[in-house]
């Protein structure tokens, strides 16, 4: 039986192989994804994001256990910084979720960013689709923890949970700009620390200023993930947001936008590979780069010429 057939019968070994094929850009990966795609679209995808040290892994661990208590199967994609030597994930979030590893209803996969910005790996969407096809009810995506630029999660998740923590210095810096705008639910983790109330007040104020005509007001929940305090209330807040998405039609809009982003991403990747291959085969690339370096030609003109020739 091929990897798709084994995966659809519930083989975790086949699931691992399928994800590895996607990550390594195997020649068979595209055909595999074509077969799996019609079986996707059923899982609830929850993004967990925020600055480093906010306790995202511990929070994900506790949330996963709560959903398991409800009888739901769980997939976890933990995106870590990439090792410059092996290309693998450095932190290994599975170490911090060791109890979940023994649960047959949970599958955890650590992924390296491999140079991608925005807090995710370029293959995250494919891995989520594979877990969806594997019939996981809830899929968590825990981002790498890169601060304000960590906004790609909104393109991949149905509900985005932004985790903050008091005592990281300038609290306002941690919650401004993109991070503030992508949050559907805000969590102040390690809320037993000094400064939690001040962070809560600042976040409330910024949400009021940023509200506009937004129909969903992101709730703020306080947790101490290490002890499990506040986790039940957080699950209720996430479920409330999913209920809002379904009733308002926002879930359909978000998933439609996700499909558009996936298509554009695949097209961009395909065009880039084609252009690079074409230029490498012609032997022109190095000479064109040299002409730009000598200021004989500018990169804008060269890029236009290359695209015109390759896509003609």
Image (tube, grey):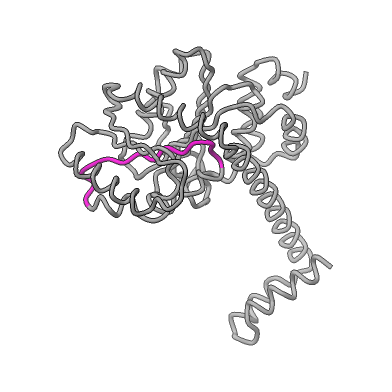
The quadrant in which the N terminus is found is top right
Residue drawn at (21%, 39%) of the image: 196
- Residue 280 placement: quadrant: bottom right
Point out residue 88 in the picture as x, y percentages from the top left corner. Answer: 50, 39
Q: Is residue 230 left or right of residue 141?
A: left
Between 88 and 245, the residue placed more toward the observer is 245
The stretch drawn in magenta includes residue 260: no
**Which quadrant of the figure has residue 4?**
top right
Residue for point 49% across, 33% down: 46
Compared across the picture, whether 76 is left or right of 133 comes to: left
**Quarter placement of the C terminus:** bottom right
Q: Residue furthest right?
A: 312
Name the residue rendered at 70%, 39% in the picture: 26
User: In the current view of this chain or complex, which residue is farthest to the bottom?
Assistant: 296
The percent coordinates of residue 138 (x first, y second) are 53, 25
Magenta residues (range): 156-169
Q: Left of 167 or right of it: where is 95? A: right
Question: Does residue 184 lie above or below 298 as drawn?
Answer: above
Q: Residue at left 72%, top 34%?
A: 33
Q: Position of residue 255 (x, y in %)?
A: 62, 40
In front: 9, or 222? 222
**126 or 200, nearer to the observer:** 200
Marks counted in the figure total 0
Q: Position of residue 139 (x, y in %)?
A: 53, 28
Q: Against 191, is 308 above or below?
A: below
**Quick check: is 166 in the magenta stretch?**
yes
């Amino acid at each position: 039986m091929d990897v798709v057939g084994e995966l659809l019968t519930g083989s975790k070994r086949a699931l691992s192989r399928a994800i590895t094929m996607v990550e390594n850009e195997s020649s068979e990966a595209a055909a595999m994804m074509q077969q799996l795609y019609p079986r996707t679209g059923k899982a609830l995808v929850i993004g967990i994001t925020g600055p480093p040290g906010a306790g995202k892994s511990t929070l994900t661990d506790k949330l996963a256990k709560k959903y398991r208590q409800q009888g739901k199967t769980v997939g976890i994609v933990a995106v870590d910084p990439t090792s410059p030597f092996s290309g693998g994930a450095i932190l290994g979030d599975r170490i911090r979720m060791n109890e979940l590893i023994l649960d047959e209803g949970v599958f955890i996969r650590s992924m390296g960013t491999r140079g991608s910005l925005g807090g995710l790996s370029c293959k995250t969407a494919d891995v989520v689709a594979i877990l969806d096809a594997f019939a996981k009810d809830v899929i968590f995506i825990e981002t790498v923890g890169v601060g304000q630029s960590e906004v790609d999660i909104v393109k991949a998740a149905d509900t985005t949970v932004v985790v903050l923590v008091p005592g990281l210095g300038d609290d306002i810096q941690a919650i401004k700009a993109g991070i503030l705008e992508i949050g559907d639910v805000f969590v102040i983790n390690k809320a037993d620390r000094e400064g939690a109330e001040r962070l809560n007040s600042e976040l409330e104020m910024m949400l009021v200023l940023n509200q506009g005509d937004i129909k969903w007001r992101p709730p703020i929940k306080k947790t101490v993930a290490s002890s499990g305090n506040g986790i039940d209330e957080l699950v209720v807040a996430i479920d409330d947001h999913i209920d809002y998405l379904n009733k308002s039609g926002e879930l359909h809009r978000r998933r439609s936008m996700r499909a558009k982003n996936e298509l554009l991403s695949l097209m961009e990747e395909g065009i880039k590979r084609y252009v690079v291959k074409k230029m490498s085969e012609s032997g022109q690339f190095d000479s064109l780069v040299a002409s730009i370096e000598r200021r004989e030609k500018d990169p804008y003109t060269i890029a236009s010429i290359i695209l015109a020739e390759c896509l003609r």
